[in-house]
Every structure is written in C-alpha cells, then in structure tokens.
Amino acid sequence: MVEVRLRAVRVDLQSNTPVLLLQETEGEGRTLPIFIGTPEAAAIAYALQGVSTPRPMTHDLIHDILSSLEVLVERVVITELRSSTYFAELHLRRGAERSIVSSRPSDAVAVAVRTGSTLYVADELMDAEGILLSIEPSEDDDEEESPDELVGQFRQFLDSIKPEDFSG
C-alpha cells in the first residue's frame, strides 16, 4: 500500500465536478484523482474547515457512532478501480476485533478526515492510475490549500450549478 494525503479537493473546470486529489507522501509524489459528488465534497470541505452544523451531517453521525462504540478507524484504503468506479475500505478495530467495511472513496475520506485516520492507495491502483500532477500551493500555506479556500470553491460551485447539469 502507498500512504497518501488529501492534497486538495477541487472542482474540475471541464466537467464542473468535484475531484479529490490524493498524493503519495513519499516516492515520486504521484496523485490519484477521484471524481466525487458535490455533497461528499462539501462534507469533506466542512470537516477540513471545522464547520459545525446545528445537527450532525451523515459523516459526523458515522464518526459519533464509531466513537460511542469505541471503534477506531485504523486506516482507509482506496483498493481498486472497476468499470470506472473506485472502491475503498474502512479498516476498523474495536479492542482485539478487526473488521473491514466496503465504502465509496468519498465517504471513506470524509470519515477519515473526521477521525484523523491515515489514507492509503493499493500499490497496483497507484501504479495504474497515479499521475504526476503539479498542484499549486495556496498563498496561505505552502503545503496545503486553506480550508477557507476549499469551502469558498464549493460555495461558488453550488451557486453556479443548474438542475439540467444533472440530467443524463
């Protein structure tokens, strides 16, 4: 497995779709881009920003349930790409008991951001789909895009989207 970090959540200008950029922490610095839904992108951006809502959002609820059951998210692994769909796993531990739960990558990353869990990509997947990508650092931080900027990008995206953008 290749350890990665959430490098950015951006909006692809061509498709007007949010994309996760997961960059390996060592090695060549390859990046795995994963297109995700707008609600999941907003959930990730809110977690990065530390935005609290009056009622828990779905990923906050998942975090609260895991915490109340004393379940630790040991890691999140993006496992494969099959028929243009990415798959992920949450590796959980409660005491000595371990389990793996299948997940969409966007949901798994949203939970990982809330739990501080480490992110990984399967070696074969990173070899096949990882790209070398120049990600411009923000002015606020030499390493990562500021959470304010991420939330701003998603607010702008949500303001510009129309219902017909979702018609197939």
Image (spheres, helix red, strand yellow):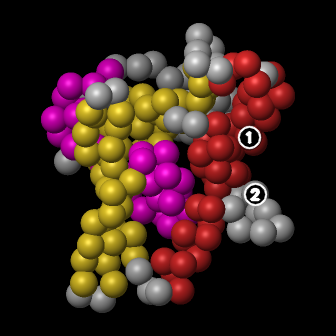
Locate residue 7 relative to residue 1 in the image: left or right. Answer: right
Residue 19 lies, in percent from the top left, at 53, 30
Q: Is residue 93 left or right of residue 45?
A: left
Q: Which residues are magenta?
A: 104-131
Q: Is residue 3 magenta-colored?
A: no
Residue toward you, 160 or 144: 160
Residue 45 shows up from this direction? no
Q: Quadrant of residue 18?
A: top right
Residue 57: horizontal and vertical position, in percent?
69, 62
Q: Residue furthest top?
A: 14
Whether residue 118 is visible here, answered yes or no, is: yes
- Mark sitting on residue 51: 2
Vertical relation: 45 (above or below) 167: below
User: In x, y percent, where is residue 58?
Assistant: 62, 62
User: Left of 25 or right of it: where is 18?
Assistant: right
Tag 1 residue = 151
